[in-house]
């Protein structure tokens, strides 16, 4: 059986029956000795502290230690503070780029919180994620330093060429003294070259619509595009190991009214990731309680998808992200090989994994860091 702490987390992300979830959470607390530090640590690990704060605040005061209630609510308030700051900074960046004819569409982060969660405080995130045209990247690299930003790792021309060739994003930080104020990620696809998720802003153009946030206009992705990109990122780039990732899928589906499943499945076939769509729906149904579209239930109820979902949930319970790098890399590779139906993508994943493993084996981290610093003027591997 799952730990009582993890069972509380699962109740906190339910979207189907809040009253039942509150009652279940109370019963778990009253029937078990709760390690409140462990509960907070797990909520932090899964990036769902706002979910936990909301359900804790519905419980009788004497059922929860006051110091835990204060701690989780402080995290909830802190998240709202970060989201408000990131939103304001996004508009400063967006307006500057627009003046140069550069489009930037908010992606994940505060936009999902606003558009689908209904409250900036309710989704935990710390970054500003923007989707851009790859052709605009060089100009963005020139413009962002004018706004007080510096490249996260290195601005050497050779490193930038490496990022363009292998990666899916280029990141900037803005500091005030030693404190990092903002971290901004510019994406031109949803995964590195080995993931085969090269969906561009041009390809998404028919699903870019007018949006509004804090009475300001912006360009946003449609409900269908937000769902597709969440599945690509949380499952195709990452591997569905956080409850937050599954909660995103559930919240988007629950609060959408015109998802174009035909378009999503067409893109999934194009990018050889149909199983990721069915797995995302299965996980969202089991964990958040949202209903799976009837037309897709045959696939989401298949033996393969059920087995994949069960394994993901088990790994969430076991805190797989805390595993050793070697074991985590192996499990991650197995997951991606089983959810992608392209020989080319599978071969690329295996090749990249083995290259990293061999490099780590033959070159100590200190030596590797020294090499990278000398070649690209950075201090750690990317």
Image (cartoon, rainbow, N blue to C red):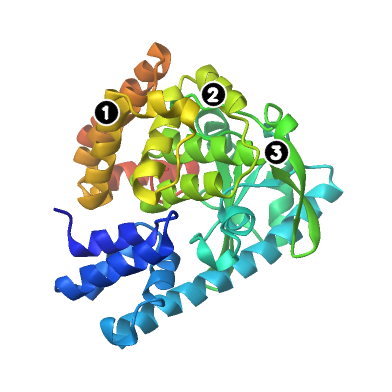
Secondary structure at badge 2 equals helix
Q: The residue tagged with tag 3: helix, strand or loop?
A: helix
* Residue 265: numbered disc: 2
Q: Is residue 28 above or below residue 334?
A: below
Does the image show residue 355? Answer: no
Q: Nearer the viewer, mark 1 or mark 2?
A: 2
- At 50% from the left edge and 30% from the top edge, which residue is drawn? 166
Q: Residues within 10 Å of mark 1 (few under 14, many from 20)?
A: some
Residue 375 versus residue 153 in the image, above or below: above
> Looking at the image, which residue is at 58% across and 58% down?
113
Q: Nearer the viewer, mark 1 or mark 3?
A: 1
Identify the residue at horizontal 20%, vertical 50% (top origin). Answer: 318
Q: Give the distance between the C-alpha atoms of the residues marked 1 and 3, in whole angstroms.
A: 36 Å
- Which residue is identified by label 3? 138
Q: Which mark is residue 334?
A: 1
Q: Are marks 1 and 2 in contact (CB under 8 Å)?
A: no
Identify which residue, 354 or 224, lies in the foreground.
224
Q: Is label 1 in a helix, a strand or a loop?
A: helix
**Considering only order in the chain, which callout, 2 or 3, is on the residue closer to the N terminus?**
3
Q: Quadrant of the C terminus?
A: top left
Q: Indicate which label's residue lies in the foreground, 3 or 2.
A: 2
- Mark before the other along the chain sequence, 1 or 3: 3
Provide residue 97's location: percent of width, then percent of height.
78, 49
Image position, residue 94 (x, y; %): 75, 53
Q: Tell me: residue 239, above or below residue 125.
A: above
Residue 305 in view (yes/no): yes
N-term mark: 1 or 2: 2
């Amino acid at each position: 059986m799952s730990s009582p702490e993890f069972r509380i987390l699962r109740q906190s992300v339910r979207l189907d029956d809040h009253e039942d979830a509150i009652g279940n959470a109370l019963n778990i607390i009253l029937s078990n000795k709760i390690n409140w530090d462990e509960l907070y640590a797990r909520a932090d690990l899964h990036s769902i502290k706002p979910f936990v704060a909301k359900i804790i605040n519905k419980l009788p005061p004497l059922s929860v230690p006051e110091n835990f209630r204060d701690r989780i609510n402080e995290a909830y308030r802190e998240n709202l503070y970060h989201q408000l700051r990131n939103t304001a900074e996004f508009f400063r960046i967006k307006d500057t780029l627009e003046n140069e004819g550069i489009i930037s569409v908010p992606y994940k982060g505060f936009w999902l919180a606003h558009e689908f969660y209904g409250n900036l405080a309710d989704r935990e995130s710390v970054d500003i994620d923007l989707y851009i045209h790859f052709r605009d990247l060089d100009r963005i690299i020139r413009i962002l330093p004018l706004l007080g930003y510096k490249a996260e790792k290195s601005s050497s021309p050779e490193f930038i060429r490496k990022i363009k060739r292998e990666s899916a994003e280029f990141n900037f930080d803005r500091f005030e003294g030693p404190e990092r104020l903002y971290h901004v990620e510019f994406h031109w696809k949803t995964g590195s070259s080995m993931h085969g998720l090269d969906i561009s802003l041009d390809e998404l153009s028919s699903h870019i619509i007018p949006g509004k946030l804090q009475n300001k206009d912006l360009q946003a992705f449609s409900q269908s595009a937000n769902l597709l990109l969440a599945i690509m990122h949380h499952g195709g780039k990452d591997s569905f190991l956080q409850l937050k990732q599954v909660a995103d899928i559930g919240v988007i589906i629950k609060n959408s009214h015109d998802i174009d499943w035909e378009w999503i499945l067409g893109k999934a076939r194009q990018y050889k990731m149909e199983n990721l769509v069915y797995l995302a729906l299965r996980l969202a149904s089991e964990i958040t309680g949202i209903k799976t579209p009837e037309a897709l239930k045959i696939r989401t109820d298949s033996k393969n998808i059920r087995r994949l979902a069960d394994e993901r949930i088990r790994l969430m319970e076991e805190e797989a992200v805390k595993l050793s790098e070697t074991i985590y890399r192996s499990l991650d590779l197995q997951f991606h090989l089983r959810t992608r139906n392209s020989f080319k993508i599978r071969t690329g994943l295996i090749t990249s994994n083995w290259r990293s493993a061999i490099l780590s084996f033959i070159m100590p981290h200190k030596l590797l860091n020294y090499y990278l610093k000398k070649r690209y003027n950075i201090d750690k591997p990317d």
